[in-house]
Image (cartoon, rainbow, N blue to C red):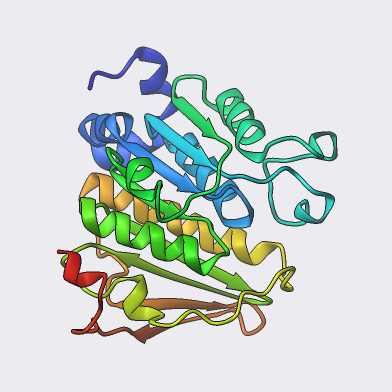
Amino acid sequence: MELTERELERYNRQIRLFGTEGQSKLKAAKVLVAGVGGLGTAAALYLAAAGVGKLVLVDKDVVELSNLNRQILYTTEDLGKPKAEVAAKRLNSLNPDISIEALTLEINEENASEIVKGCNVVVDGQDNYKIRYALNDACILHRIPFVHASVHAYEGRLMTILPGKGPCYRCLIPVPPPEVKGFPILGTVPGTISTLQATEVIKIVLGIGKLCIGRMLVYDALDMAFYEIKIERNPECPSCRLL
């Protein structure tokens, strides 16, 4: 996909890394950001800035005051407005050369397959286990990479799921724990983890580097430390059997 003169200037520092061919791959990519909250807003921001050609933002919620310590695309003036629509508008003001689709709806087992179909990568911006399972299964069905992340208090976690290679989300969490609403979170933690999600997406699209497959990357903000947990594929996993 050919780059315009403006795009060559906008992405100059990246093009020095991976050339116009790599930037053209980003321009041709379609990425789903499933949830534009603490994780999804920062991930979407960096993907838009990097020149991913089409972003699909999905979120059923509206902006609330308690979101604003960590959901960086929103302001006080946006309270009560649909998150996906506000996020799309902000990202388009940052980069008018990309296409952004905003969907104000809830992902579930019935619609997940249709929503992810045709995407190159799916970014997990959810805080709901049922929705993550639905996305995981849909991505496995369509063989789409799924970049999972989660945050709580001072800790963030990241794992990339590549269908057919390594464990999936259901291998990681076979049985969902009880859902917790309004869990504590330091605002910078989802920012840190979601920029790593965006990095994984870029690496997947470009086909470069080593992905976080079969290992959970854990960030501890209090100790300012990263460490890894090895994750094995579950041979009895019902989701992996879809392959």
Residue at 67% x, 32% y: name it: 86
Vertical comparison of 21 with 134: above or below: above
Is residue 208 in view from this perspective? no
| Residue 145: image location, x then y, percent | 28, 55
Please identify the quarter of the rendering in which residue 224 is found: bottom right
Vertical comparison of 187 with 101: above or below: below
Marker count (numbered)? 0
| Residue 95: image location, x then y, percent | 52, 25
Q: Horizontally, is 220 left or right of 140 in the view?
A: right
| Residue 178: image location, x then y, percent | 60, 80
Q: Horizontally, is 58 left or right of 152 in the view?
A: left
Residue at 36% x, 13% y: name it: 5
| Residue 55: image location, x then y, percent | 44, 35
Residue 68 or 84: which is nearer the viewer?
84
Residue 39 or 222: which is nearer the viewer?
39
- Residue that extends furthest to the front in the rendered view of this protein: 110
Please identify the quarter of the rendering in which residue 232 is found: bottom left
Q: Horizontally, is 218 left or right of 135 in the view?
A: right
Residue at 36% x, 71% y: name it: 169
- Residue that extends furthest to the top in the rendered view of this protein: 5
Residue 36 or 42: which is nearer the viewer?
36
Look at the image and tell me in which quarter the N terminus lies: top left
Residue at 46% x, 54% y: name it: 108
